[in-house]
Image (spheres, rainbow, N blue to C red):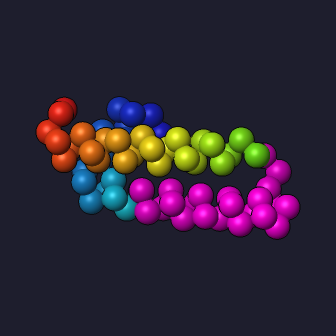
Amino acid sequence: MKVNEIRALGNEELLKRLEEAHQELFNLRFRLATRQLVNHRELPKAKKKIARMETIIRERELGIR
């Protein structure tokens, strides 16, 4: 997801997507530990996606944008 797409989401939808992203990261880590993960670049992508969402949530809390 791009930043503009994330900003277009409402607060509840954003929190729902954040929870899904955390679940996805958990599953990727589990697959990595069991050596079933083929593309290792998926882990940093998932972390970056979570960081983007958390940053936008924090911006909204502070009223920056």
Instruction: Locate the C terminus and report the quarter of the image it occupies.
Output: top left
Q: Please state the total of marks drawn on the protein image.
A: 0
Q: Within the image, what quadrant is residue 18 found in?
A: bottom left
On whether residue 23 falls in the magenta region, the answer is yes
Residue 8 in view in this figure: no
Decide: is 37 above or below 65. below
Locate residue 28 relative to residue 37 in the image: left or right. Answer: left
Locate residue 14 relative to residue 30 in the image: left or right. Answer: left
On whether residue 50 falls in the magenta region, the answer is no
Decide: is 7 above or below 32. above
Decide: is 9 above or below 18. above
Please state the extent of the stretch shown in magenta in the rendering.
Answer: 18-39
- For image coordinates 55% across by 47% down, the residue present is 47
Locate residue 54 relative to residue 11 in the image: left or right. Answer: right
The residue nearer to you, when weighing 57 against 6, is: 57
Decide: is 18 above or below 5. below
Residue 44 in view in this figure: yes
x then y, percent, for residue 21? 50, 56
x then y, percent, for residue 36? 83, 61
- For image coordinates 35% across by 41% down, the residue present is 55
Q: Main secondary structure of the magenta part?
A: helix
- For image coordinates 45% across by 44% down, the residue present is 51
x then y, percent, for residue 48? 52, 41
- For image coordinates 60% across by 42% down, the residue present is 45
The residue nearer to you, when weighing 20 against 58, is: 58
